[in-house]
Image (cartoon, rainbow, N blue to C red):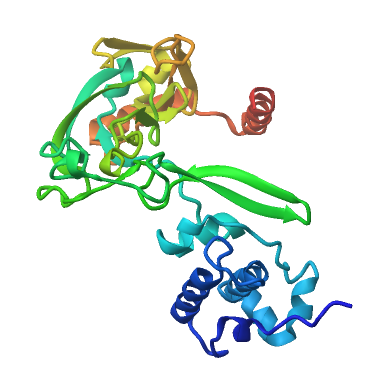
Amino acid sequence: MMSAKRDYYEILGVSQQADGGELKKAFRSLARKYHPDKSDAEDAEERFKEIQEAYAILSDSEKRQVYDRYGHQGLSGGGGGGFQGFHMNFEDIFSGDLNDIFSSFFGGGQRRRNSRGSDVLVRHNIPFSAIVEGTSEELELNLLDDCQTCDGTGALDPTKNKHCTVCGGRGSVTVRQQVGPFMVNQSTQQCPECAGRGSIIDKPCRNCRGEGRETRKQKIRFDIPAGAESGTRLRMRGHGEPAPRGGGDSGDLIIQLEVQAHPWFERDGADLIMSLPVGFPELALGARISLAHIDGKELLIDIPKGSSAGQTIEIRGRGLAHRRGQRGSVVVLLKLHMPKKFDKKTKKALEELGHTLSIGAEDVEQSVRDEAEYRRRNG
């Protein structure tokens, strides 16, 4: 018959109102006292497991709530999560951050990995003309870089750094987690004491205060691809923040392009769309109109005779670049330019012209039918 489990608060010798600091202090003290490698007591191993279990539950706010309300029974099912047990090296109890140690065993928090510098995001406005053929630009930015005084080591004198006693200078520790009654999962993780460097700084660099990094102006040159859109991100690998004290690779610099609007073009993928107001004579008789284009060359727009307002003209190959090396089109939407005022001479000429060009009453209905049929056929 199994003996009843002891109360977790009783095991750690704390009250039910104990905060995280009190729990941690009690655990450290008892773990030192009953660790099987240091204690001669016959029940040291059993007591040590008991202490581990108590701290694991009470240091987890959700599990502690369940335990306070339902006791051990509330933790025995799947809902409470239970306790699977764990092993740790003796050094882990006396050094490092206890939260880092326990996050490795219980899945809570974040595991420490080989530190990598952070990525840096910069938003950069570019003129519309920059995306026509693509171009190169240069930015001067204030970015973190390796400290020049200590060469990124963070130490005043790297030769006097102390050997890390937690990992034995290896930069990594072995973590064992019991996943079942007869199974232990073993993995290697970055040492939490030295952050994977294998040594501890004796005296920090006065310039960077041990960080190994300082802010400096840097010139970054990059290519803007033809046809780039707003929101396009260019990743400059290794140009982000360096890892603290040379602990890993530098992060990336990410340049997000914001393309400024063009005075008259709107963009639809690689196509450029514009409205072109013209007079009635140009629509009726046809015309050729010349505009300066974004590529620096002349853009010729041929308006066919008998064109109507709302009609579009497509000029192929004069839009923006595709990824496949081709170009989109310029799509011109014809609009009728109607003056707000007419002088007497113009008004009289329009009245005379109206007699010739006006649609007769008997033809209005047929014109409406023809227009509807045209829209149906052409979408």
Give the left or right position of residue 157, taking residue 1 as reference: left
Q: Nearer the viewer, residue 163 or 336?
A: 163
Count of residue discs = 0
Q: Relative to 334, is 56 above or below?
A: below
Which quadrant is the C terminus positioned in? top right
Q: Residue furthest right?
A: 1
Taking the image as shown, residue 304 lies to the left or right of residue 137, namely: right
Look at the image and tell me whether residue 332 can be seen. Answer: no
**Residue 310 location, x and y as percent?**
49, 28
Q: Nearer the viewer, residue 12 or 105?
A: 12
Instruction: Tell me the quarter of the image containing the N terminus.
Output: bottom right
Query: Which picture quadrant has residue 214?
Result: top left
Q: Is residue 313 visible?
A: yes
Give the residue displayed 46% in from the left and 57% down from the top: 91
**Residue 166, image x, y percentages:** 41, 51
Question: Image check: 94 left or right of 252?
Answer: right
Question: Above or below — where is 266 with respect to 341?
Answer: above
Q: Nearer the viewer, residue 4 or 266?
A: 4
Q: Is residue 319 above or below residue 99?
A: above
